[in-house]
Image: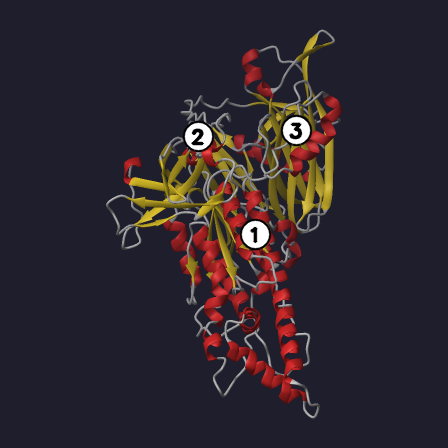
Amino acid sequence: MRTELKVKFLILVCLCFASLRASAQIQKPSPSPRPADDVIRINTELVQTDVMVFDKSGKFVSGLSRDHFELSVDGKPQPISFFEQVRAGTPQESRLLSAASNPTAVPESPAVNENRGRTIVFFIDDLHLSPDSLARTRKTLAQFIDNEMNENDRVAIASTSGDIGFLQQFTDYKSVLRAAAGRLTHHAYNVRDMTDSRTPMTENMALAIERKDDPGVLQFYIDRCLQEAYPLRYKRETCDVQVKSRARLILLQAASVTLNTYASLESLMRSATLLPGRKLVFFISDGFLLDTGPRNADPRDKLRQITDTALHAGVVIYTIDARGLFSGQLDATNNVPFDPQNRLESTSLREGPTSQDALNALASDTGGRALRNQNYFDRWVNKILDETSEYYLLAWRPNNQEESQTNFKNLAVRVIDHPEYSVRLPRGFVNPTTNTPPATPTSEIQGPAQSHRDLQQAMTALNPKHELPTSLSAVFFDTPDNGAVLTASVQVANEALSYAAAGGKQTAAIDVAGVVVNDRGKPAGSFQTRLNIDPLGDHRAAENSSSIYNSRLRLAPGLYQVRVATRDFNSGRIGSAQQWVEIPDLRLRRLTLSSLLLGLQTVGQAKGDSGSPQVQFNVDHRFARNGRLGFAAFVYNANQGGSISFQARILKMGQPVATTRWQTVSMSSQDAARILCNGELSLDSIPAGQYMLELIVTDDVLKTSASEQTRITVE
């Protein structure tokens, strides 16, 4: 009877398009108390850096202490005020970095056994990529997303051109990353020779002319100018001016493209400062000139700014020359002139290495490495992720006598008595007293009048706000009457609300706002309401209850992001959440699953139909260890008259920790267009922590399969 009742509840949820009561209160177990985390307090501003130490075989050297290290700033020894060995992606890393950079901040308690995962950026310099290099880059991204990305990683794919658009954001949703990689297109290198000369001039040749490094190069182009001018009789002085002007124009264009690349990279790293922990950036490019001549801005100053931004954001850059293995005689156009007198030989041999100088500098200055002359760099990405999983965090107090200086400070760290160890760290930093604008103080919320603006700011923020604990679940179903329907459920814990006297009662209210945007960042729907929360007489019930608001929207197939924000009307505290959801195109006739629904339960009677129970699925996906996890989903495009089998698994880092047996669905009494698969999993033997629940469905006749995953927390 219990299973049959749940099936009826589920069908009501999926097939009814009417809204549920906005302020449904649901009793649920309160989380188990967690021990308070140790708080590290640093009362003086510190400068911090991460350091990696490797032995001769390239293996990370662990177990070193503060006494093993010697730190110097601009050649002067500096005492180490803070030292810790850190493992990337752990709650410990967030607490240590927060403590070292913001002594007054109160660290948040992480979720039970939470593994935050790695923060990784693939920065694609698509303004300096050939078609072949772009193809290798796409292959590397696909390999990482499909096989190397962990379930808790936060990954972003960005590009110099900005073609990725709204999808250029951190996410753990693989469909978003695949879509972002799919937007990468080839951009023809837009540095153009404006003359009608038939003799190509590379950027490196132009640089040799501009800097007067190799007189033979200038003489070669002057000779070619005189020959191409025939039957006109140019003077040598005329061709000298023409060749130098031609070189200057090429370098000016190259400098403009390079500055755009630097600006995009620096902007990305400034955004990364808002994310906790250490960030790895894989910068993929065909290379470009580090120096574009004395008439253009000094690129080294820009690189120092990037290095400083990386240091403050906890970013380490690893650069990849996407050209792979090559001879070295290349430039951005692959068009190198030929001189039978070999006057260009020396400069031609420097074409490849010169274009790698900027990549080398970006990597070494931020503590990373540069990959050159290797065709299979997807393996290298995985190797780097492994070797950077641990590091040492060092911090020191700046010298008061030097605080008035704003010059670049060079860092050096060595392991005492171990010259065989290699040490990697950022090359330096800009003194903290540079002209950095002070942070704008956050204004206090002053009553309900600011509600709309506060909710909008919370929805557009890079990181969710946790002043008011808010959960979001966005699920997709195909319904007979309305087609594809997205249901966004927002949940707020009642115990976090502030109650105030109104009409002789202690009441609370929640402002809820949400927006659904497509993969281009265009709004596809929105909702806004106020939930009036009735007082609960039982104090224990109030502590264990939640208020849930459901909003439904008909949508076309595509990729969508739901962003929601909540505000406690009485206290002004804000909470927010966001989630991606993909609505498949069922017209393609592929075996497809709806979103997973977890923990269905009744919450009352639907208005206007006293005989129909009102149901609600679990929103925050938190479950007690001693309970059972109920799950359900619909299967679409199954073979008519065939059979469907399904299995549910709970995964930790890709490995199953609990599995149901394969079950066959009886289709005789079901709508063949929407076949229900549901069941339960016992959580008795599963330790507290975060997991992935996966449902796998197979069509036994067509021999095809589909799967759907969602995150859960066992407490």
Give the position of the C terminus as an image quadrant: top left
Q: Nearer the viewer, mark 3 or mark 1?
A: 1
**Residue 406 or residue 549, whichever sits in front:** 406
Q: Which residue is mark 3?
A: 566
Query: Residue flagged by tag 3: what amino acid is it?
Result: Thr
Query: Residue flagged by tag 1: what amino acid is it?
Result: Leu
Residue 112: numbered disc: 2
Q: Quadrant of residue 544?
A: top right
Q: Could you say whether the residue bearing mark 1 is in a helix, strand or loop?
A: helix
Residue at 65 percent of width and 69 percent of height: 249
Number of dots carrying numbers: 3
Q: Give the distance between the C-alpha atoms of the residues marked 3 and 1, in whole angstroms.
A: 33 Å
Q: Earlier in the sequence, mark 2 or mark 3?
A: 2
Residue furthest left in the image:
417
Q: Earlier in the sequence, mark 3 or mark 1?
A: 1
Q: Residues within 10 Å of mark 2 (few under 14, many from 20)?
A: some
Q: Residues within 10 Å of mark 1 (few under 14, many from 20)?
A: many
Q: Which residue is mark 1?
A: 265
